[in-house]
Image (spheres, grey):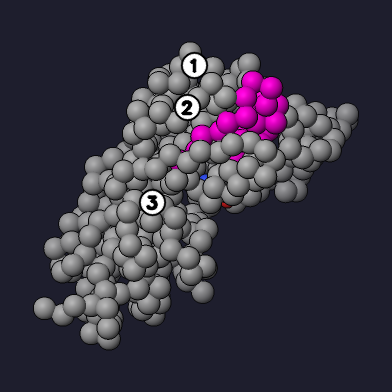
């Protein structure tokens, strides 16, 4: 098993360890502080108090009010509730939804589902860096458009979208903006009191909380239809007994992220910049995918001519280094990443990509170890590759 203590873990995008401070905060809620907020006895009351305290913490993290936060089982569920719940509830106002070609797989598949339900879904293409131009998006909006969904940043190539400009462009149009903020949260400041975003999905693990918890921010006044039916928890929008210990963990993670982000983001950006500089100078025919500047502080996404990311990943794995070939959610399929293809890469270029993501426990020595292995591995694989044009 990979032990982050002794091995080099450069795949924070697919999973983050839970911060030990978060584990400490959660622990009592599995045992002596257990409870169901729906119960009418004192144990239930205490669980309700805890739940509401956590809602306030997550709201503060997003610059929102507690009434605007609904806890879910993760960002996939938050995205489902946001898009399907909004489209169904507001279909009398129109039947058109706009997403982009570079969304997380959950939004891409929800888009397909909405088409089956009779909605028209338009996908806006990005530029070569994976960035969406607000004017291009505006050109897709019609009188029938009710909802636009744009990820704040790409979980694959790390490109950050101009969310402020997109939100301002939509202000006053009657079109609601949903933002999947999972890749950006904890790395970029998010303040719902300052940007006119209507719906925003976040997850707990991406801020070093437990997996399987998330939240949807729903701006006051926005109406959604529930997507799952049951006991009516979370204002009837997300039925099912609340995952109290998980929610306590997400709230603790949000408090820590709020405090530490301003120091942590530049620290990670410095590790990333060093990795980018050294990889591009040490390895010929290597390229950076995504935007050179408008990118997440922790993300470096490379492409190496003539070799496959999969072989690269396995060779690095043999050397005790964990990286990803592209999207964590599609790394077990052979299809090239839809994001890279939308940026204009050929299939073989997309297949030659490697994603490195740093996180809270990354250090300079991780870049040292990467640089000790990666150039040699690339050279070895290219020697065996019929695709690489040797010079
Ligand atoms: N959106 C983005 C941008 C993601 O990276 C992920 C995966 N971390 C999700 C949504 C889905 O999150 P979850 O696995 O918590 O449902």
Residue 184 on image: x %, y % = 42, 40
Q: Nearer the viewer, residue 351 or 113?
A: 113
Answer left or right for 367 relative to 11: left
Which image quadrant is residue 68 in?
Answer: top right
> For the magenta stretch, what is the residue range?
78-100
Q: Is mark 3 within 8 Å of ligand 1?
A: no
How far apart marks 1 and 2 lie (CA) works out to 10 Å
Q: Is residue 49 visible?
A: no
Q: Which secondary structure lies at badge 2? A: loop
Residue under the point 34% across and 34% down: 133
Identify the residue position indicated by label 2 in the image.
141
Residue at image position (88%, 30%) is 41
Asked if residue 112 is among those painted magenta in the image, a careful observer would answer: no
Label 2, ligand 1: CB separation under 8 Å: no
| Callout in the foreground (1, 2) | 2
The residue to which callout 1 is attached is 173
Q: Are marks 1 and 2 in contact (CB under 8 Å)?
A: yes
Instruction: Judge whether 252 appears above or below 352 on screen.
Output: above
Residue marked by disc 3: 342
Between residue 297 and residue 176, name the one nearer to us. 176
Alpha carbon separation for disc pair 3 and 2: 20 Å
Q: Is residue 293 above or below residue 145?
A: below
Give the structural element (helix, strand or loop) at label 3: helix
């Amino acid at each position: 098993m990979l032990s982050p203590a002794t091995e080099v873990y450069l795949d924070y995008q697919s999973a983050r360890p839970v911060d030990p401070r978060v584990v400490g905060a959660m622990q009592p809620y599995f045992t002596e502080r257990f409870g169901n907020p729906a119960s009418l006895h004192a144990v239930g009351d205490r669980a309700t108090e805890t739940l509401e305290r956590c809602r306030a913490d997550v709201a503060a993290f997003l610059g929102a009010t507690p009434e605007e936060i609904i806890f879910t089982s993760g960002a996939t569920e938050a995205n489902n509730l946001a898009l399907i719940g909004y489209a169904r509830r507001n279909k009398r106002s129109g039947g058109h939804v706009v997403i982009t070609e570079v969304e997380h797989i959950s939004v891409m598949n929800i888009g397909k589902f909405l088409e089956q339900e009779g909605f028209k879904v338009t996908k806006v293409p990005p530029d070569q860096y994976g960035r969406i131009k607000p004017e291009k998006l505006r050109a897709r909006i019609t009188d029938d458009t009710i909802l636009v969904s744009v990820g704040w940043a790409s979980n694959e190539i790390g490109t950050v979208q101009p969310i402020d400009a997109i939100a301002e462009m939509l202000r006053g149009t009657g079109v609601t903006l949903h933002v999947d903020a999972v890749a950006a949260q904890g790395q970029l400041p998010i303040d719902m009191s300052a940007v006119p975003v209507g719906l925003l999905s976040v997850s707990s693990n991406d801020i070093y909380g437990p997996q399987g918890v998330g939240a949807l921010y729903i701006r006051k006044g926005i109406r959604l239809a529930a997507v799952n039916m049951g006991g009516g928890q979370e204002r009837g929008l997300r039925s099912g007994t609340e995952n109290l210990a998980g929610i306590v963990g997400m709230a603790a993670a949000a408090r820590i992220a709020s405090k530490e982000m301003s120091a942590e983001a530049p620290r990670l950006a410095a590790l990333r910049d060093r990795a980018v500089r050294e990889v591009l100078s040490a390895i010929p025919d290597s390229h950076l995918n995504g935007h050179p500047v408008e990118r997440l502080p922790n993300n470096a996404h490379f492409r190496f001519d003539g070799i496959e990311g999969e072989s690269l990943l396995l060779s690095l794995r043999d050397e005790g280094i964990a990286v990803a070939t592209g999207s964590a959610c599609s790394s077990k399929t052979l299809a090239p990443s839809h994001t890279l293809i939308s940026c204009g890469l050929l299939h073989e270029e997309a297949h030659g990509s490697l994603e490195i993501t740093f996180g809270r426990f990354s250090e300079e020595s991780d870049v040292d170890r990467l640089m000790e292995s990666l150039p040699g591995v690339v050279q070895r694989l290219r020697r065996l590759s019929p695709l690489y044009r040797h010079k």
